[in-house]
Amino acid sequence: MTSIVDPHLVNPPPVAARGPRRQLTDLGPLAQLRAGRLGRRLPQLLLGLVLYGVSLGMMVRGAVGLAPWDVLHSGITRFVPITIGQTVVVMSFVVLLLWIPLREKPGLGTLANALVVGFSADATLALLGGAEVLAYRVGLMVGGVVLCGLASAMYIGAQLGRGPRDGLMTGLARRTGWSLRLVRTGLEVTVVALGFALGGVVGAGTVLYALGIGPLTQLMLPWFTVELDAEPSGGGAAG
C-alpha cells in the first residue's frame, strides 16, 4: 500500500524552532517519540492504519480496481498461497530492506504500518462479503478510496514515521535528485505493470485512487495533524 500525497506532505519544509505547531515535521525515530502528545498520536496512528486496511478490504471486495501497490499484491496472491493482507505485510518488509542502501530510518509508525494494515485488511475481508450488484461494488470502491484518504491523513498526521512505500519514494528521490512526483510516478507505473502481468486487479478503482487519494489526503490532513509540544532535540530525517 502507499499513500499518494503532495510531495510537501511527505518531505515538509523547515518549521519554526519552538512552540506548538500543526505543520508536519521531518523527525528521526527517537525525536518522533520525544515530541510529546503520545496519548493522542499513538491511538490516532493505530486507528488510521486499521482504517487503511479496511479501505483495502473494501476495494478488494468491490473488484473494480485496486490501488497501484495493491494491484501488485493481488497479483502475487495468484501464485503464492497467502492472503492479500499477508502479502501486504511481507512486501512491506521487502520494501524496508530497500531502505538500507537508501539510509532511510524507520519510525514506530513505519513498523506499525508494515504489520497493522495487512492484518486489518484480512479481517475486513473475512467480515465483508462480496456481491454481483455493480452499484454495491462501485460503492465499496468509492467508499474505500475516501476512507483511504481519511486513514492516510490520520496516520501521517500522527507524525510517527512514514510508511515503507512512502519512505522508498522519498529515499529514492533524495538519492537520485529526481523530483518526488517523478519517482512516485515511476514506482507506481512499475508496480501496476508488474501486478497486471501477474493477473492483479486493475480497473476504474485504480484510476480513481490515483487521481483522488492525493487531494483527499491533503484536504483532511489539517484535521488530524497533531501539534507537537516542542522542537525535540536529536531530530534528523524521518523514518
Image: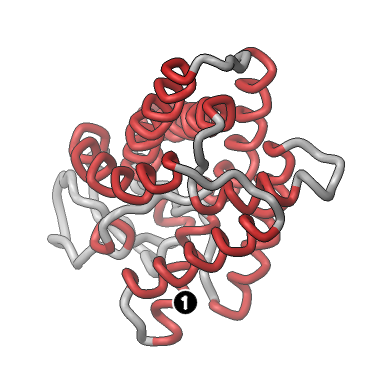
Q: Is residue 106 left or right of residue 166?
A: right
22 lies above or below 237: above
Q: Residue 145 versus residue 180: which sits nearer the camera?
A: 145
Locate residue 43 relative to residue 215 in the image: left or right. right
Q: How is the image coloured?
A: secondary structure
Q: Position of residue 201 (x, y in %)?
A: 59, 44
Identity of the residue drawn at 58% across and 15% down = 131
Q: Position of residue 8 (x, y in %)?
A: 24, 62
- Which residue is at 47% across, 77% downward? 172
In which quadrant of the rendered view does residue 204 lie?
A: top left
Query: Who is closer to the viewer here, 56 or 20?
Result: 56
Residue 79 image position (x, y, % from top left): 83, 50
Query: In the rendered image, which quarter is residue 124 located in?
Result: top right
Q: Nearer the viewer, residue 124 or 196?
A: 196
Q: What's the residue type where badge 1 is placed?
A: Leu
Bin the neighbour count of mark 1 within 10 Å (Cα to Cα): few under 14, some 14-19, many 20 and up: many
Q: Secondary structure at mark 1?
A: helix
Is 119 placed above or below 193 here? above
In the rendered image, which residue does mark 1 sit on? 172
Check the image and report above or below for 102 versus 114. below
Q: Where does residue 31 sit, x and y in percent of width and height?
A: 40, 56
One can see residue 46 in this view: no
Q: Is residue 224 visible?
A: yes
**66 with respect to 5 (left or right):** right
Residue visible at 63% across and 63% down?
194
Q: Nearer the viewer, residue 239 or 80?
A: 80
- Write the residue at 48% across / 65% down: 189
Q: Residue furthest bottom?
A: 176
